[in-house]
Amino acid sequence: SMEIKPEEAKARIDKGEKIIVLDVRTEEEYMEKHIPNSILIPVESIDKDAPAKLSDKNATIFVYCKSGRRSAIAVEVLTLMGYSNVYDLGGLDHWPYETVSGK
């Protein structure tokens, strides 16, 4: 699967590229802290919820979790579902930039 480093991801987001940043952790983890403007679909329900929440299969999607384990699984599932521009951003543990809390 395609991986993307935090530095490159941040640069592309800051450039204003149309990118979906996808958090695949739990709702509790998301509420505690997440990357600004990211959306939440827990990895357990990604096959069920992706079609409604990610309607464009050609969209650029950066996927992250806490350590990188769940993001790798989610990227694999999304790729098998036909999403063509999915990147594994890895874990929030390695994200040196701003995070926000709450919804």
Image (cartoon, grey):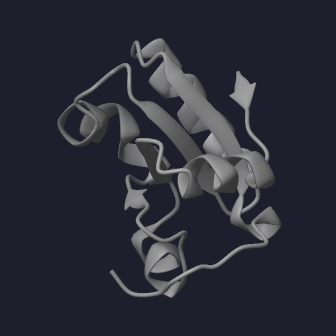
Relative placement, left or right, of 56 versus 64 is left
The one nearer the camera, 17 or 64, is: 17
Residue 24 location (% of width, % of height)? 50, 53
Residue 26 location (% of width, % of height)? 47, 66
For the N terminus, the image quarter is top right
Relative placement, left or right, of 73 versus 47 is right
The one nearer the camera, 29 or 19, is: 19
Number of marks in the rendered image: 0
User: Is residue 85 placed above or below 25 in the rendered structure?
Assistant: above
User: Which residue sits at x=75%, y=54%?
Assistant: 6
For the C terminus, the image quarter is bottom left
User: Is residue 53 placed above or below 85 in the rendered structure?
Assistant: below
Residue 36 location (% of width, % of height)? 48, 71
Relative placement, left or right, of 4 versus 77 is right
User: Is residue 68 placed above or below 76 in the rendered structure?
Assistant: below
User: Which residue sits at x=39%, y=59%?
Assistant: 40
Q: Residue furthest left?
A: 52
The one nearer the camera, 88 or 15, is: 15
The one nearer the camera, 73 or 90, is: 90
Relative placement, left or right, of 8 versus 80 is right
Picture quadrant of residue 94: bottom right
